[in-house]
């Protein structure tokens, strides 16, 4: 095979991304050089944060370039190797391009073991998703046994893991999600103590107060917007908010307004801090070790939504913003 | 003297406080008991945070009771003592009632030395004001040499000290204030590098960007509201915002709206944290020691606005919200 299909950023979305922001082209595969491998893509991770890279506004990672391939977390099989680090038949994880087949530098790839966990898990619970949940919660949330943890986007890839880690660490865990099916899953599958379906709840602030009668000590925020406003009214003295994401406003075309957080933070000596997993690279090995241990002890479960087919990657990404995933969304090739 | 005048909370303000929220009554002074002292008030501190205690909404300290005396930081002279801790003629500092003469428990009072610093300084730079500036900046702001520090309410009691400590610690310091007279004072008296008069500036976000070409690493926020919105557009990766106060919105009757901070915090891995000096009581002695050392080395200056007359305490308090003070506002009896 000398050519590969590639998904490129055709134009930048204003507001909600659409299929027309992407196009698929076919290009030649170059020969591999010293230190490189030829890879066949097996699983592609689609994640809300990619929305930020589709804009050209400055953010924590550079924007994608127009008419160049999109990239995300990918699990691939080594077809040919020109490095001693990997052999033909190995599986690797890395930040790779949306191509069926590609040449990549061996640096920055990590070998993954399909006998220890399903390959897709290395994009989720044993990858950036799991690390985001674990390090965001422990490094910023600093949870203490007996405290109350509130999680928004709780049925999402990160949120469902955050809640389970909260239970392992001895907290009361309350999850917010967007359907009864999801809130039931949070309780029956993931052991959340209380849940709130925000789509059927009129007064979120009151509902959070009822679900968290001792107030909120740690708020793991994946969504921003109105749900985060409602959480503010329930935070405890010395509470910590992990700002992990703001999916509810990623598609806004101008900065959204909400209730000013400053007076709440002053009144409650409360902390809010943005969390990006890439800032904690030195803690990734310890995080993966802990997650793998809990997984092997059956203390952690994970949900996946697996789509199939290279050409369906963009639609899978768009469906994240409609909440069509339960847990981690990946595309299998 | 067997009676004293007392200033009480007559009714709770909605929105901006007014003179009619207070009344002055005359009451008898009880005899002093074991462990108590009889005090004559010399200086009364008026502070923006007292606005919070006039409401009955929960906050970090309990609300004042209706038809009971207001209390704040006060310097008083000991007229009679029934404790070994203090002698007649000593001066003490404490959280005391707005009375000309009062009986108080010796516990919780601190002796102050009029030979080391003017008495009013113990309400300002060597009191809660200085501690708020020093501990807020160091404990939450974690300033590093060479960084840029932005201070709002910079000509106020806390802000003017924050800026000077920033300079002592080797930062570039930019101050925001509400008149040209104030901004000139910030430069000539307090050594701020750059200043912005927010009342004559159209685009605050742009002005902050111009004054802070390397971005803002530490934002010491005394005001909240629109100025804090403008600061958000200029924060650096890993920046820290000390939410010390939000005077611009204390008088709002419903929670004010502003640009959502969450997407900014996520993009910049940035921290915001509410600061209340009472949370750091164990660090007060070290703070006072450091402030006194800098003061004795002429590294710190302080501004005071001194009003006179017991009956003028409420008006002095109201004038804080009009920005009529330069530095610390106190009332001398």
Image: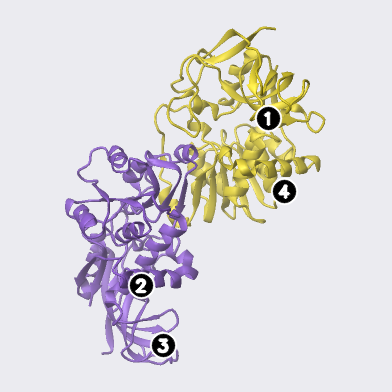
Chain colours: A yellow, B purple
Q: Is residue A155 visible?
A: no
User: Percent x, y for residue B286?
Assistant: 45, 71
Q: Position of residue B99 (x, y in %)?
A: 30, 78
Q: Tag 2 or tag 3, which sits nearer the N-term?
A: 3
> Residue at horizontal 70%, vertical 35%?
A125
Q: Can the viewer see residue B209 in this picture?
A: yes
Q: Which residue is mark 4?
A: A168
Direction front: furthest residue: A34
Which one is closest to the eye, mark 1 or mark 2?
A: 2
Q: Is residue A51 above or below residue B3?
A: above
Query: How far apart are labels 1 and 2 at the CA level?
Result: 56 Å
- Is A124 on the left or on the right of B321, as rendered? right
Calculate the distance from the C-alpha at mark 3 to the C-alpha at mark 1. Answer: 68 Å
Secondary structure of the residue carrying tag 1 is: helix
Task: Tell me the subunit letter for badge 3.
Answer: B
Q: Secondary structure at mark 4?
A: helix
How far apart are labels 1 and 4 at the CA level? 22 Å
Residue where numbered disc 2 is placed: B292
**Up/down of A193 relative to A26, above or below:** below
Residue B29, percent from left and from top: 32, 86
**Do marks 4 and 3 share a subunit?**
no
Q: Helix, strand, or loop for circle 3? A: strand
- Residues at marks 2 and 4, common chain? no
Q: Which mark is residue B69?
A: none
Above or below: residue B296 compared with residue A81: below
Q: Nearer the viewer, residue A191 or B300?
A: B300
Read off the residue under disc 1: A123
Asked if the residue at tag 4 contacts the one at tag 1, i.e. Cβ–Cβ closer than 8 Å, the answer is: no
Read off the residue under disc 3: B36
- The structure residue drawn at horizontal position 43% and vertical position 21%, both measured from the top left corner, is A14
Separation (CA) of disc 3 from disc 2: 29 Å
Nearer the observer: mark 3 or 2; the answer is 2
């Amino acid at each position: 095979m000398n050519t590969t299909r590639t998904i490129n950023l055709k134009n930048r979305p204003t507001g909600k991304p659409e299929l027309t922001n992407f196009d698929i082209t076919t290009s030649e595969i170059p020969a591999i050089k010293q230190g490189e491998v030829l890879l066949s893509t097996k699983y592609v991770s689609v994640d809300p944060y990619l929305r930020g890279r589709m804009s050209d506004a400055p953010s924590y990672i550079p924007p994608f370039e127009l008419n160049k391939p999109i990239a995300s977390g990918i699990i691939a099989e080594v077809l040919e190797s020109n490095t001693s680090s990997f052999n033909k038949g190995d599986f690797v994880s890395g930040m790779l391009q949306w191509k069926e087949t590609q040449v990549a530098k061996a640096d920055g790839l990590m070998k993954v073991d399909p006998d220890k966990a399903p390959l897709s898990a290395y994009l989720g619970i044993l990858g950036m998703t799991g690390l985001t949940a674990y390090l965001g919660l422990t490094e910023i949330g600093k949870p203490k046994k007996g405290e109350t943890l509130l999680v928004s986007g709780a049925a999402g890839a990160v949120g469902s893991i955050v809640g389970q880690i909260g239970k392992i660490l001895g907290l009361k865990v309350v999850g917010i999600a967007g359907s009864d099916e999801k809130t039931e899953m949070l309780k029956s599958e993931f052991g959340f103590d209380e849940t709130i379906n925000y789509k059927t709840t009129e007064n979120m602030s009151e509902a959070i107060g009822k679900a968290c009668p001792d107030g909120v000590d740690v708020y793991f925020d994946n969504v921003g917007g109105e749900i985060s406003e409602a959480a503010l009214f329930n935070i405890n003295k010395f509470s910590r908010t992990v700002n992990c994401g703001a999916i509810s406003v990623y598609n806004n075309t101008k900065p959204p307004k909400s209730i000013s957080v400053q007076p709440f933070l002053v009144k409650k000596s409360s902390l809010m801090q943005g969390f990006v997993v890439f800032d904690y690279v030195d803690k990734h090995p310890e995080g993966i070790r802990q997650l793998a241990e809990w997984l092997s002890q059956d203390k952690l479960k994970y949900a996946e939504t697996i789509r199939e087919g290279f050409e369906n990657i963009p639609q899978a990404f768009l469906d994240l913003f409609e909440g069509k995933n339960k847990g981690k969304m990946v595309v299998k090739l």
